[in-house]
Image: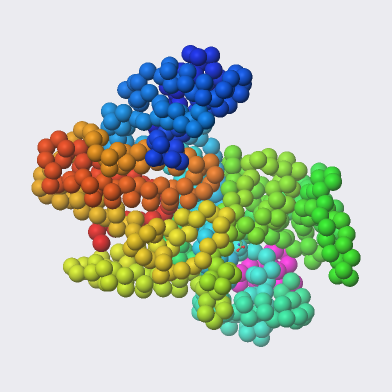
Amino acid sequence: MKDLAHALTAANAAVFSSLGLDAKHAEVRRSDRPDLGEFQCNGALAAAKSAGKKPPEIAQSVAGAWNATELASTPTIAGPGFLNFKVTPQALANRAQVIADDARAGASVVEHPRRVVVDYGGPNVAKGMHVGHLRASIIGESVRRIYRFRGDQVWGDAHFGDWGFQMGLVITALEDELGGFDDRAKLDARLQSLTLEQLEAIYPAYAAKVKGGDIETRDRARKATAALQGGSALHREIWKAMRDVSMAAQKRDFASLGVDFDLWLGESDADPLIPDMVKDLDAKGLLEEDQGARIVRVAGPGETKKKKLEDGTVVEVESPDPLLVVSSEGSAMYGTTDLATIVQRVRDQKPDLILYVVDQRQADHFEQVYRAAAKAGYIAREQLEHVGFGTMNGSDGKPFKTRAGGVLKLNDLIGQAEEKARERLKENEIDADFSKEEFEDVAHKVAIAAIKFADLSNFRGTSYIFDLDRFMSFEGKTGPYLLYQAVRIKSILRKAEEQGVAPGPITVEHEAERALTLALDAFDGALTAAYDKKAPHFLAEHAHTLAQAFSGFFANCPILPSEGAVRASRLALAGAALKQLTLTLDLLGIDVPERM
Ligand code: ARG
C-alpha cells in the first residue's frame, strides 16, 4: 500500500521523464516546511546540474508540464527551485478511506521476507534483572514486533546469561555456606529453599570479595566454573536449581513488562556445540596460543590502536582485540558462547539476519565475535548487526542507581511507576467509578506506557535521564498522554454506537481533517524508517504526531454534535485514527486500556 509521497513521486517521475530528465531526481518527500507545502521535491537542483541548466529553469519546466491531477494541484516553486505540492481534498479522502478500511491501517509489508533472530533482554541468572536490562527488553521487544509486522519471520531470543564465571562464583558461595557439598540431604534442602532474593544477595557479596583481591575464592570459583562446564553432575545440579529459581522470577518480570520471547534459550544451550566448534576453528587454522589461552585474531592488516602500558609507554596493538575462545583454565568465555550461539542459530533458525539489541558499551565485544564468525565461515559479516543503545541515567548524568547506590531492580522500578500512576490517576479523577481490579489494571498499563514511551521516544543510541515525574505526566510527549488520547477516541466511538451513529464515506474539508489525514498517511514512512534503522523512536514520534493531529481535529471538528454525511465521515476518521494509534502503540509494546 503506497502512501501519498510515493504516489506523488510516481506522478512526478512521469513528468521528469517526459521532459527528458532523469526520473531518479523526481522523488517527492514530506516537506519539513509544511507552511510552504505539504510535500516537496528538491530534485530540480540535481537535474539542473546534470542538464547544465539553472535550477529555477528546470523547476519551471516541471511545473509547466505538471497538469493538475486528481492527486495534486500544479506545484509551486520556492527558493532556488524547490517544487512544493499540495494534495487535493479528493486524494486525501481516498487515502483516508483506504487507511480506514485496511486492517493494517495503511502499513506496507517487505517485498522479500527474511528470517530474523532478535537477541534481546539478556538477563543474568543469579544476578537478577536490573534497569540495565530494561532498555534491552523494551527496545528488543519493539524491534521484534516491528520486524514481524513488516512480514519477516522473527524469533526473539532471551539469551540468558546462565553460564560462565558468575555461575562458578555462586556455586562457591553456596559451598562456603554449607561447609561443603558432602551432606547430600543438607544440599537438597538448601537447593529446595533457594530464592531469587538470596541469589541476588550472594552474587554481589562474592563478586565484591573477588574484586577486592580474594585470590583463593577467585581460584575456587574458576575451578567450579570449569567443573560445571566439564560436565560434573553435582555442579550441574546446583546450577540447574539456581537457574530455575532465576528464570521463574524473570519470566514473571518480563510478563509484567509486556515482553515476550519465542526462544527462552541461554548461553548454556550453546555449550554442547563448543567442543566441535573449537576443533573446527583449530582445523581451519584460526586458533592461536596466547599465554596459555587460545584466541582468534580478527584485526585486518594495518588495523591498530594505541595502547598505554602500565609503565606509561604507548605501543601500537592490533584492533579489534583478538577473541578469547578458551581461557588458560580451559573455560569457555562470553565470546565463546556468543560464537557457538551463532553456530546454533545458523543450524536451527537459518537466519538471514541476527540483531543483537545490547548496550552500546558492548560494541567491541560484538565486533570481535562477528568477525570471528565470518572468518570461520559460519555466517557473513553483514548478517550480524549490533543494535546498540545508550544508558538510562540518573539526574547526575551517570547510569541510573538507587538512592543507596545500588542498581534498581526491574520489579521495584515497575512498582514505583505503578505507585506514581495511581497518584496521577487519582489527581485526574480517573478513579471515580472503577472497580479495584480495573483501577489496578489501568495503573499498570499507564506505568508501563510511561516507562516504555520515555525510553522509545529517544533515538536508541542516545542516553536519557530517568525522571518518573516527567514520564508520568498526562501532558506533553508521554506515554500516559497517548493512552489518554486513545481512550478518548474509544469513548467517542462507544457513544456513537450507543446513539446508533455509524461511520460513512470519508470526505476531507476542514483544515484539521486535512492535518489528521496527512498524519495518518505518514504511518508507513515512520514504520519503514523504524524497520530500516532498527529505531522504534520513528514510531514513537508518529504516535505523538497522530495523537496531536487527532486532538486538533477533535477541537475543531465536532463529531457527534454534527450531522449526516459530515458526522459519518468524521466518525470514520476517528475510527481510523484509533486503529492506527493502537497499532503504533502495540508496535512499541504499549497496551491501551478500555477507558481511563
Ligand atoms: N547477559 C549479558 C549482559 O547482561 C547480555 C547478553 C547480550 N546478548 C548476547 N548475545 N551477548 O551483559
Question: Which quadrant, please, contains the N terminus?
Answer: top left
Residue at 48%, 51% in the rendered image: 537
Instruction: Check if residue 228 falls in the magenta segment.
Output: yes
Instruction: Check if residue 161 falls in the magenta segment.
Output: no
Q: Which residues are magenta?
A: 223-242
Q: Is residue 115 above or below residue 295?
A: above
Q: Position of residue 541 (x, y in %)?
A: 43, 50
Residue at 41%, 27% in the rendered image: 76
- Left or right: residue 530 versus residue 435 is right
Q: Position of residue 9 (x, y in %)?
A: 45, 26
Question: Which quadrant, please, contains the C terminus?
Answer: bottom left
429, 244: nearer the viewer:
429
Q: Position of residue 8 (x, y in %)?
A: 42, 27
Q: How many marks?
A: 0
93, 419: nearer the viewer:
93
Q: Quadrant of ligand 1?
A: bottom right
SS assignment for the magenta stretch, majority = helix
562, 505: nearer the viewer:
562
